[in-house]
Image: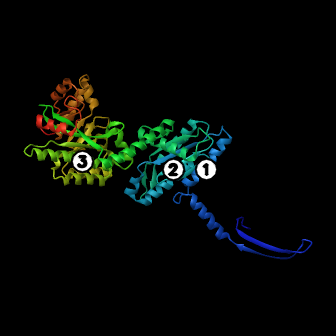
Amino acid sequence: MPDGQTRWALVRGVALRGENGRAYRMAGSISDIHLQKLAEEQLVHDAFHDKLTSLPNRALFMEHLGGALGRRATNRRFVFAVLTINLERFHLVNDSFGHAAGDELLREVGDRISRTVRRGDIVARIGGDQFAVLANDIGSEEEGLRIAELLREAISAPARIGNDAHAFFPKVHIGVALVEDHDSKPESLLRDSDNALHEAKRSGDSAVAVFHASMHSKALRTLKLEADLRNAMLTRGIDIHLQPIVSLADQRLSSFEALARWVHPELGILLPEDFIPIAETRGLIQQVSLRTVQQACKVLKKWREAQPERPLVPISINLSAVQLANPALVHALIERAQDTGLPPDCLRFEITESVLADLTGSAQQSVDELRNAGFQIMIDDFGTGYSALSYLHSIPCDLIKFDGAFIRRIADDERLRTIVQHSIELAHDLGMKVIAEWIEDERQLVILRDLGCDYGQGYLFGKPMQTGQAHEMWLARGEGDRD
C-alpha cells in the first residue's frame, strides 16, 4: 500500500488458450480478504498466547522447547536452560485487593521478566501465577543462575498497583533446569524446572534452586506419599499420640500435647514433619487438622464418660501458618470441637512464635476467632530467634513454651539461665504461664523449677504415647495445677 502497510487480497484468474497455447480470453477477480486474514491470525495468536499478558502460553512454550532440543541434537555445544518462576502468596492480592489488582500485578511481572531476559529468550505464562523462561544459548550452569538472580531482583522491586497505587513487594521462587541430554523431551525439562522450583520453596533460605536428578526421585516419592496420604484419610490411618506436660512443683499431670502419627504400611510410623508439608501443599491439611481435633475430642469425651467426677486435663493441638491463613478451616475446627459438647478449656492451640509475632489479615482473624470461642492460645518454640520481650505483651496468648534448644543448654550456660529467668518473670507479670520442653534429666528439672518455670515436657516425664497409655497416666498421676 502507498502508506507502507500490508493489506491482504485474494487474486483469482482463468484463461482460455488456443492450439498454439496462447491465451485468447481471460477472466479474473480480486477480493479484499484483509479483515478475514486478520481474524484468522488473531485466532492463531489467541490459541498460543495468554490473553491477560499477551505472552506465549504453555502450548507455544512447549513448541519453543522442542525447537531448542532439535537445535541441541545437531549442535552439542548449544546449551539452554528452562526457568520456572512462581509468584508467592499471589492469592492474598486477589483476596485483599480484588482480581483487577491481581491481573495488573501479573501483567507487571510479565513485563519485568520480558525486559530482563536477553534477546532471543522466550518468556511465557504457563499457569495462574507461574511464568517460564527459555534461556537460549547459555554457556554454563552459572549463566543460568545469573539470569535467575537478575529476574528475582527485577521482579522483587516495589510495584504500585491499583487505583490507590498500593505498593506491592512481589516475592518469587525460581527453579532452573539445564538441558543435559538431546534425547530429553519438552515435558521432562519443564517438569525438572518445576521440581527445582518446589525445592527452592522448601529450602526457605534460597529463592533459586537448580535441578538435580535426586529431585526427580524425591518428587516421585512425594507423589507416592501423597497418594498414600489420601488413602490414609479415607481409612483413618492418621492417629494421635499424646505427650504429657507436668507441673514442675509436684510433677503431677497437667495436660497433654497431641502429636499426629501416620502408621504407613511400608515406612512404619511417620512423624508430622514427614507428611504435614505434603498435606499443606496438596490441599489435604484441612482433613488432617479436622481429624486431629476430632480424635482429641473423642479421647476427652471417652475419659469424661468413664470418670465423670474426675476433672479432665486439656489437650493442645498445633496449628501452622498455612492453617491459620485459612479462616474457613479454623471455623470448621471450632465447630468440630463445639459439636462434642466439651468445654473450650479442654482444648488449646499451639502456634509458633514467628507466626504470632507477625499476625496480619486472615491469620489475625483466625486467632481472634479461636480466642473468642474460649480456646487458649500458646506460643510454641518461644526464643527461636523472633522473640523480643518488648512485644511479648502485645501477642494474644495465654501460655508460652520455651524452645527445647534453650532447655538443652540451660544447665551449662549461666547467661542463658538469666535470660530464661527474666522471661519467666515477665510472662508471669503479664498473666501468662510458662512451659519448658525437651526436659531430659533431673538437673534441668531442678534448675527450671528454681527459676519459677510452671510446667515441663520431655522424655524425663514421658514420651509421646498411645491414647490408652495416656489414659492410664491420667488415672495414676492425677491432675496438677492446670497450665
Residue at figure coordinates x 7%, y 45% from the top left:
309
Residue at the farthest right position: 20
Q: Amino acid at mark 1?
A: His
The quarter of the picture where the N terminus appears is bottom right
**Which is nearer the eye, 3 or 376?**
376
The quarter of the picture where the C terminus appears is top left
Q: Position of residue 454 (x, y in %)?
A: 16, 34
**Which is nearer the eye, 178 or 416?**
178
* Residue on which disc 2 sits: 131
Q: Position of residue 305 (x, y in %)?
A: 12, 47
Q: How many marks are shown on the rendered structure?
A: 3
Residue at figure coordinates x 58%, y 54% from the top left:
60
Q: Position of residue 434 (x, y in %)?
A: 19, 36
Image quadrant where residue 448 sits = top left
* Residue on which disc 3 sits: 293
Mark found first going from the N terminus, 2 or 1: 1
Mark found first going from the N terminus, 3 or 2: 2
Residue at figure coordinates x 40%, y 59% from the top left:
98
* Residue on which disc 1 sits: 64
